[in-house]
Amino acid sequence: MKKAAFVVILTLSFSAVIFAQTDDLKLRSGVTPNKSVDEIYRQFSEAYRTLNVDLVANLYTQNAAYLVPDDEVMTGREKIRASFQGFFDYVKSNGQTMTISFDIVQRTVDKNIGYDVGIYTLRRFKDGKEISSGQGKFVVVAVKETDGRWRFQVDGYSDIKPKSAAK
């Protein structure tokens, strides 16, 4: 009986890790899936695929802090929305599409707050062909709001410079 219970627990744990692995979200070894936080990333990736500024903006709290490279701290969902609007409009105006995926390196989540450290990969396409890709590192703080929904309270990122070719 103890052996059967152990097998069930082991199977459920393994299934949870496999379930969390998608093309858009990878959790490194030791990173525990969290359905609510993982859903933020799923929607974030969907917003990039569809260039849906309202979807991405709604993933942030009303007073979120957005820390973009080489700029001041941007505070508030509306300012964050405007930033994404400009970026998404630029991509659309060039007849492009894009995807974003996430590789979570570290995670801690408690009842109402959590953080992730990871790497994102952004790919842009034109006429179905990849025209550029890049990676960056990020840290986010997610909070559970009073309505039970998790959103980003803090989002900071910076590019990772491509490794130069071996000489």
Image (tube, rainbow, N blue to C red):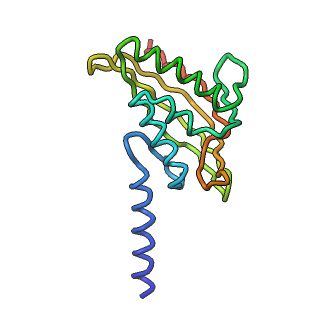
Picture coordinates of residue 36, whole percent (x, y): 53, 53
Quadrant, the N terminus:
bottom left
Picture coordinates of residue 52, whole percent (x, y): 45, 30
Left or right placement of residue 32 versus residue 18 in this view: right
Seen from the viewer's position, the closer of residues 59 and 98 is 59
* Res 112 → quadrant: bottom right
Who's the residue at 39% across and 61% down the image?
A: 15
Asked if residue 125 is positioned above or below residue 137 in the image, the reply reads: above
Q: Residue furthest left?
A: 128
Left or right placement of residue 92 versus residue 57 in this view: left
Picture coordinates of residue 2, whole percent (x, y): 45, 85
Who's the residue at 49% across and 19% down the image?
A: 162
Asked if residue 90 is positioned above or below residue 141 in the image, the reply reads: above
Quadrant, the C terminus:
top left
* Res 45 → quadrant: top left
Left or right placement of residue 4 versus residue 28 in this view: left
